[in-house]
Each structure stands twice: as C-alpha cells, then as structure tokens.
Image (cartoon, rainbow, N blue to C red):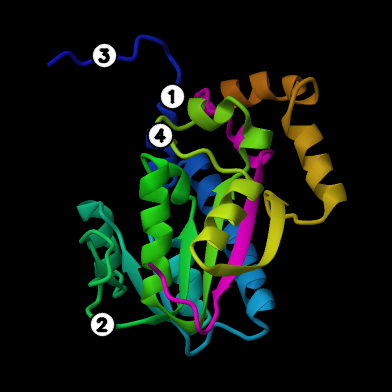
Amino acid sequence: MYVMKNTDNDYDYYKFWSETQGHSTYQRIFSWFKKKVECLYANLLESAMSRQLAGLSLLEIGPGQGYFAAEARRRRAEYYAVEKSFSLSNALSQRNFMVTSEDFSEMTYGNKLFDVIYLSHVLEHTESMSQAVHLIQTCWKKLKVGGYLMVNTPNVLDYKFSFWLLDYTHNFVTTPLRVRNLLNDCQFTCLCDVRTVFIFKNILPRKLIQIFCRPPFSLCYKPLLHVLMKRNVDFFDVVGFENCSIIARKEEKKIMP
C-alpha cells in the first residue's frame, strides 16, 4: 500500500481540530471558541422551540470532543450520543455521558424516540446524496412527533474551495437551500434558517468578522501570529466563514416511506 507523506511544513489541519487536550495556546483558543459556538447553537435551538432543553431527551450524532454534550448537560437535558470513533466514544463515556459507537440506525438505543436530534457539522461528511438522505430519514424515524432536528453545516457559497481544502472528509455539498430542500423532502417542516459567523448571527458583526479574518486585512497580522505560534494554521480563516443552522420539526400525520 502506498502512503503519501506530507512533505511541506504546514501543520496538519485535521489533526489540529481533533486535538483539544493539553495546554497549548492553539488548544486553549480552540476550546474557548467551541464553547462559545455551542452555547450560541443551544440558544438558537431553545429560541426555535420556545422552551428550554431541561428535561428533554436529546440525541447528538457525532459529538466529537463533547463540547455540545457539556452544554446540554449544563442545561439539564437528557443527553445521548452516537460517536463512531471508539477513542472519542470512550472519552465521553469516562465523563459519564450516555454514548454508543454503533452505526446510527432505527435501532439505536432500542425503541427510544427523542425530543431533539442534533447534527453539528456532520451532514457534509456523508459520502453521497443517498447517504445524506438516509441519515435525515433515520433522524425523522427516531424523533417523537413534534420533535426537533437541528442541522449545522458550512455554507459552501461562502467557504467556496476552502470547503474541500480545509477538511478532506467533506463530501456532501451543503448550502442553506440544499439542506432545507433535503429536510422538506424528508417530511420535516423547517422553522428557521440562521446564518452565523463565529458567535454572531446579525449581519453587521458577521461582515466585520469576515473583513477582519480575510485578505487584505488578515495579511497584516497572520505572519506575526505564525511566528509567535510556531505553526501555520489559518484559524482565523475558519472563524470568518459563514455557517448555517437550520431547525426543523417533525409534524403529525406524516409517514416516512
């Protein structure tokens, strides 16, 4: 088997986003960033539902390092997770979260249905359109009637080629319209479509962050940051991209084929 080696000096971007243990400057920045973002997403979800998460059964698909899990626990939700990575699943279990590493299916957690299912930056990793449809259909079947699905994805219209450059596992192209159409075709009723940049949803701060994080302005501080951090990671590029959060509800009297 031929394994292509990385011959340049760029820091492994995918590895960087996977590392949150330790005390490096980048890891502290990442941890702070993720906590703020997951708090924003939880606020958006509660606003769309017109109620708090406390007491609701919530299933997260792909929790990763568990930042939203911690936020859900803080808000007293009944939290469950599906995480295919054994190491991440084991780490969450050690923090006393209910998590399974099995494939997500109608039989996940037996016959249990959930009030909320949360997908944050998972849909774009599905390998094909049919797999994306299957994922959303399974979410529909695992929700209670009147339950909510929240889907957070990159907006490819803003990321452009960085959608593929920043993460080689991005496959399914996600735009707000494509995701809404997918949810509608799977019998969901879309309640809201919110665009966010970093922790901002209002248009003015979103645009200001994007100006700050992109050339030519970013060229003024990036070389200095790379020297100080000793790593060539375009963290501020990621912060400046637009993501979309779509919240939908499973209505009554609809049967998933």
Query: Which residue is disc 1 drawn over?
Result: 11
Query: Which residue is disc 2 drawn over?
Result: 111
Which disc is residue 4 wearing?
3
Judged from this view, the residue extending furthest toward the left is 1
Which disc is residue 14 wearing?
4
Q: Residue at x 31, y 73 (%)?
A: 97
Instruction: State the image quarter where residue 218 is shown.
Output: top right
Q: Amino acid at mark 2?
A: Asn
Q: Distance from label 1 to label 2 (Cα)?
A: 44 Å
So how many labels did they put on this image? Answer: 4
Q: Is residue 140 visible?
A: yes
- Seen in the picture, residue 161 relative to 148 is either above or below; the reply is above
In front: 161, or 201? 161
The secondary structure type at the circle numbered 3 is loop
In front: 229, or 159? 159
* In the image, residue 246 lies in the stretch drawn in magenta: yes
Judged from this view, the residue extending furthest toward the bottom is 55
Q: Is residue 65 visible?
A: no
The secondary structure type at the circle numbered 4 is helix
